[in-house]
Amino acid sequence: MASPAPKSPEQTDKTKKYDRQLRLWGDHGQMLLEKAKVCLINATALGTEVLKSLVLPGIGAFTIVDGEKITPEDIGSNFFLDSESLGMSRAQVATQALLELNLDVRGDYIDEAVEHVLSHSENFFSNFDLVIAAALSEKVLIPLSKHLWEANVPLIVCRSIGFLGYIRLQVKEHTVIESHPDSENPDLRLINLWPELENHLQKIDISKLDSKERSHVPAIVILYYYISKFKEQNNGALPVSREDKNQIRKMIRESAVNDENGIKTLEENFEEAIRFVNTCISNQTIPSQIREILEDDSCTNLTQKSRPFWIMCTALREFVETEGALPVRGTLPDMASDSESYITLQQIYQRKAQAQAESIYRRSCQIARNVGMHQDSISEQEVKLFCKHSSELFVMRGSSIADEYTKHCPDLSSQLEDPDSLMFYYVILRGFERFIGDFNTYPGQYDDHVEPDVLKLKMIIGKLLNEWGCSQILRDERVHEICRYGGAELHSVSAVLGGTAAHEAIKLVTHQYKPLNNTFIYDAITSNSATYTL
């Protein structure tokens, strides 16, 4: 779809500014983004790259927590810092630079280490919608993870070392209404018609139309006509099998008419009807993942603390039990047709979707009142969106990073045996973080300590593998390579990883698209990446 003309009265300065992203997550997603408050821990090259990719699309507000002063290493890797800021507060300088990118965004900073904030302001991090942490050691990460897990605040942990990047997402429960599947079949209900739609379709007899009228009929009308013909020929049976659908295709092709040269051809709308046979002729069964959501304990055992998502799911479950199907989506695919025929058909689908959404909205409000929630906690607009996308609902329940580090031993044996797996990087990173906690420095940070640090890191990694019950031994050159980096960040790697982490942050804030579950590893040497659920 082409962009509206810049002078269109429908466009404000704001919609012009955010035009491209509004196409991705809509004005309702933009509104959630502009309400969000994000905290960044450590304004490293990676940390500022993540925040940059949130400031540009208009995150509501951010706060940087960082007690470090700017070093020559920072200036060499961080695009937002220059030589004039050497020795200054990294949090302050990064905040000022980021705010210049978007005047709509509010920003603040705390020039203190995260350990100090955690120990002196217990509920500080609970005030944010999302916390992003860059370059944290294991000793700091574990208490932060525990705190945010209990507060139910999502946490994105990321690290960039040399040519290696890592992202870990911690979220207790995340619900998505608009998961934006890669492909989605049209919701036409040609098998399960309602009276208004059936009456409209029955009015048009394809066999009695002249050539001009034929070319203006929407493909849906054509499909319905030949489905009816199929039922007449098969004692009222519906087309279910591949053979049945092939028979309908054959019937449509045989309806070809002579063109000006006397050659039989099919009009564009009839060709569309043939293409729609596979995707539009089906019984509207409830997808298994949606049934699981509707049978979830959070849906069946509501409390005053239940999220609006689960209230709407309960109302949807009752609707499905009564109707035997999900609400009508209310949208039509583009079709070759005259405007009047298409709009008339579109309005029939929209009226049905509107009526069903209103019914589910009234029931949602009633359920909310019954559990002691305020009726305003659920808006009619939210329910309409929920109904429209009811076939793509998604719920993700993650795991705690603190449990992963202290209780849960990941089973990595099979993945470490795979020569193409990037899991060995995860093992190295875990050893790297423990090294920082034990020695308060990066392995290989000082040139004269590279070889001794390689031995120390190998011992730490070996101990970790033993704890996890893994017999594999990592190759020496892999451990040596990490020590050779000396903890240095490369801006190009941080930029790629920062954009990736920001994408995940936007998914969490807007509740659109499926987020990462739960570990992402990026190897810039080979340009390979992989995701793992740990």
Image: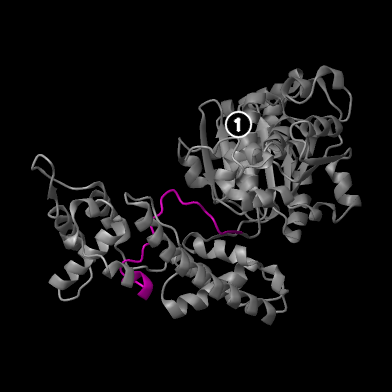
Q: Name which residue lies at 66% across and 59% down.
A: 172
Q: Is residue 186 left or right of residue 531?
A: left
Please name the residue shown 58% across and 36% down the image. 425
Magenta residue span: 175-198
Q: Nearer the viewer, residue 462 or 89?
A: 89
Residue matched to label 1: 496
Residue 210 counted in the magenta span: no
Q: Decide which of 312, 69 is in the foreground and name it.
A: 312
Percent across and percent down for residue 451 are 69, 22
Q: Where is residue 482 drawn, in percent x and y?
A: 64, 28
Residue furthest to the left: 262
Q: Position of residue 199 (x, y in %)?
A: 32, 72
How far from the left and from the top, in percent, is residue 461? 64, 38
Any part of residue 346 in sight: yes
Q: Main secondary structure of the magenta part?
A: loop
Foreground pick, 179 / 60: 60
Tag 1, which secondary structure? helix
Task: Indicate the quadrant where residue 241 lies.
Answer: bottom left
